[in-house]
Amino acid sequence: MKLTGAQIIWETLIQQGSTTVFGYPGGAILPAYDALYDYNDRIKHVLVRHEENAALAADSYFRATGKVGVCMATSGPGATNLVTGLANAMLDSSAVVAITGQVASHLVGSDAFQETDIIGITLPITKHNFLVTDINELAQTLAEAFYIARSGRPGPVLVDICKDVQQKSVDYTPVTSVELRGYKAIKPQPQKSVADKLAQAGALIESARKPIILAGQGIKHANAHDDFKAFVEKSGIPVATTLLGIGVLSEDHPLNLRMMGMHGEAYVNQAIAGADLIIAMGMRFDDRVTGNLKTYAKNARVIHVDIDAAEINKNVPADVGIVASLKDVLPPLTSMIEKRSYASWLAQISEWRGDTQSHDILQVELPQDMLLAPQVIRTIYDVTGGEVTVCTDVGQHQMWQTQYFQHKRRNQLITSGGLGTMGFALPAAIGAKFGRPQDEVWAIAGDGGFQMSIPELATVAQEELDIKIAIVNNNYLGMVRQWQELMHDRRYSSVNMWSPDFVKLAAAYGIPGIRAKTLQEAREAVQMARAHKGPYLIEFSVEQETNVFPMIQPGKSLDEMTRRPIQPAALGGGMDTVAR
Amino acid sequence: MLIDKIEARANPTTHTLVALVENKPGVLNRVASLMRRRNFNIHSLAVGETEDPSVSRMTIVIDASKTNAALVERNLHKLVNVIEVQDVSNMPTVMRELALIKVSVDDAAKRGEIKQIADMFQSRVVDVAKDSMMIEVAGEETKVDSVLSILADYGILEVVRTGRIAMARGGK
Ligand SMILES: Cc1ncc(C[n+]2csc(CCOP(=O)(O)OP(=O)(O)O)c2C)c(N)n1
């Protein structure tokens, strides 16, 4: 069958099962969009309002569904606009295929109109990228792109396709196998060495008295959450999760201590600092998780399991490093160990935990007319029953989301971790809603981050997407203000933010909304949002200078946390710095 | 004999990686980009064709005092176009470098001396001009270093070094 290059693009997408595409047309990708006209019954193309949001939506679509997210853009400015989204997918290991148009092959290198070297630009922020100048290589290359994106440690792959390649025709047969000479999804190693390492890990677990599991999103990528639960329950070992690992085990599970790191609860970090064995699974010891590496978990032996060999010994040296999918490691490890419970270790941790609860902001009597951002998160949790999918932006509200919302399943919290991309929430909610249309999807953003993605309100309106948007408005770039308060002597430099009337703004897009200034109003607003079928926006006006605690300040050790004040600052409470 | 001795005291702070990569446009760029991005310190990188025209061979010398060679190796593995990587530092390996050295010479006596030096190091004079000579040195880098330090007294005009190339001894 003779097909044009443009048709081959859509045929490949259908074959790969990725029939939702987030994109934006333009000159060099015109042939693909022309062909799309005849594929509209099989491909859903979502016209975003900025290409960055196409990439972010595709990233979120992957996180929500496990299927490769696809985004598309034209050459030059279209392609460069993808950059932030691709970097986001790279740092958070999301399988995304980005397809860009490029100037005709005979013009490459001539500074033709809208020519940019997007291959060079995206080299360090993609798992791999391809320039296609020959139609005979197009189908194979696209199949390779999907394979590379989703296999091993997932990541973004960009395919830059010259305009003439899209226009030419070739005999097309669907690609059924991919053979890449240099690519191995997992670095190959002798069977024996894996078995030996498992045995070593088993022995370390056997002799530990204060073990802890550090769980990351590698468990999600391996689709191994059931195996993980079985391992946790048999081993009796408590679990701390990374930000992206939230949901690998329900947060109401008695062995789930919840999130670790810079804004993790104090008892979680205390448990890590006090552990004699760390079992790290599908996580990479990011600096936001470890604090000062020199003092990190000094007394612990370390077992590190990751699918990416280059993560072993990168930041924290491992006594036993296992390079494998958790799907292959967890079952044998579980059958190897004995069922145990660490009564005195768990008792020690729950003592620390009790202390945390007495510090909790929600335990404090607050004036009726005051609304704190953490209360907004808790209200959404309470009113919705906590079953909704939440896409956050980046900043204080994001951290409060981790603290005041109990996530019960994987894919429930979709958030930008490694890159910390402001403007993520709204495009992420769009991607998640297309991926999981049955879910109630909430975008929760600060007033700053939301203003980076306002244009996507039009996408929400045009697609009539039933997304609930919560803006936590503290009139500041809250997280930056917090750092300036704590580390720069309260010299507030360019963090005070004027914002439009968000409710009126939503109205201009035909999206109803309401403002909430008290806890009572907040509850009612969330109820109204849920009762409305279709998109709805709530602007929560919250106390302006609430800080996120606990906090490990940069360069500090896990056990040098600044704790929550007994009273919030707005009520005259100071900070409680505890160095244990 | 001499060469073997120099080999024996191979610089302990360097690691030598041999990478077989697909011979495709942009692959050198990918390797170089990785080194820069991860802040890996490299001494030299030599690339050339192999017995298989679809494969190129890179010899990468790493400053092991600043960079963890195992991490470099594992990161190279992740590049889609890299077929195979081997750290040959602790294997019986032949390592060589080629250098061209141009020395300023203006009288016949000195010309003779330089010829003698070249002979001592089993090197060759490859060009003689009115006021200069060019020497070709092949061997371990330490040998090239020695020749350079001796020739320094005569006034070195220009030097080019290929960087290390390496091949493990014995069958494949
Ligand atoms: C694109 C981008 N620019 C800048 C930053 C740095 N930054 C991190 S948090 C933050 C403040 C976010 O403020 P806001 O969106 O109002 O959320 P809040 O912290 O108040 O909840 C900034 C500017 C970033 N993470 N991303």
Image (spheres, coloured by chain):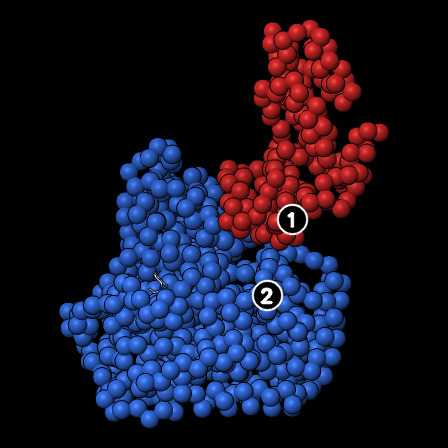
Q: Which residue is mark 2?
A: A294
Q: Is residue A376 above or below residue B37?
A: below
Q: Which chain is red?
A: B
Do we see residue B149 in this rendering?
Answer: yes
Q: Is residue A203 above or below residue A27?
A: below
The C terminus of chain A sits in image quarter: bottom right
Q: Which residue is mark 1?
A: B65
Residue A54, which numbered label?
A: none
- Image x and y of residue A148, in percent: 52, 55
A73 relative to A146 in the view: left or right: left
User: In the depicted view, which residue is nearer to us: A476 or A397?
Assistant: A476
Looking at the image, which residue is at 71% across and 72% down? A201
A561 relative to A26 in the view: left or right: right
User: In the depicted view, which residue is nearer to us: A209 or B83?
Assistant: A209
Looking at the image, which residue is at 53% across and 42% down? B32
On whether disc 1 and disc 2 are found on a single subunit, the reply is no
